[in-house]
Amino acid sequence: MDSVIGFLKNTMFFKDLSDRDLAPFLPIMNRRKLADRTLLFLQGDPITHVFIATAGKIKISRNDQAGKEQVLHFKQRGDLFPHVGFFRQGHYPANAQAIEESEVYSMAIKDFEQVLMANPSLSIKLFRMLGDQIVSLQQRLEELALRSANERILLLLLRLCETHGTAIGNGDWIKLNTRFKNADLANMIGTSRESVNRMISQLRKDDAVQLKDGEYLIRPEMLKDEMLNYN
């Protein structure tokens, strides 16, 4: 149990809670190992569980009316998802699929909600986290409406540096912990793979981005400088 509490204290949602605050969650958490390409839930399925990623990577995506996939997020260790469905009946708004061997803790929504209702301070923390997610979604909608394809690519890479990156060397470079295909990047910002290919090629020529063994290395400060050209 101590190892589980230690893990929870390193997650965004639980990090400020005491051992006593965390204790009610332990009995309702069930560990699940997922093989590569395992589906956790499908868009439109009734919401029954909330998950915390503990290892590997989980792709969150939606299908549009034409059946085309749009990648929304990649969840990794410490991420709680989905962010909808608490205190209401509803359906999963997206698909969740492991993109490598992964592991999650699952908690039944009914049990999770009972713990939150018994601990109002936890509910307040959840609402704050949901507020952050709403702000993030608003920013992404603004980018889609007002920014060019090249700007959206630069902003996406900067965002991935923050959410999926690890500083290496003297800190000038950030390595993305998730292996992204250019098609994934394109889907995340509603542009074409060709546009991403062209932009990445230019950034590699400028030595702002490197691609080694399928992993992205990025210089965030150079991307920020590049953004100035569009302002």
Image (cartoon, rainbow, N blue to C red):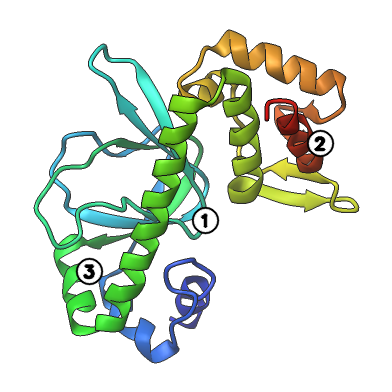
Q: What element carries label 3?
A: helix
Query: With respect to residue 140, does 136 lie above or below?
Result: below
Query: Which is nearer the N-term, disc 2 or disc 1?
Result: 1
Query: With respect to residue 114, does 192 lie above or below?
Result: above
* Of the two numbered discs 2 and 1 in the rendering, the one whose residue sits closer to the viewer: 2
At x 71%, y 20%, the residue is 200
Amino acid, disc 1: Arg
Q: What element carries label 1?
A: loop
At x 51%, y 50%, the residue is 76
Horizontal side of residue 187 vs 24, given as left or right: right
Q: Name the residue under label 3.
A: 112
Query: Which is nearer the N-term, disc 3 or disc 2?
Result: 3
At x 37%, y 66%, the residue is 128
Pointers 2 and 1 in contact (C-beta within 8 Å): no
Using the image, tell me which numbered label, if any, was put on residue 222.
2
Q: Position of residue 224 (x, y in %)?
A: 74, 38
Amino acid, disc 3: Phe
At x 31%, y 50%, the residue is 82
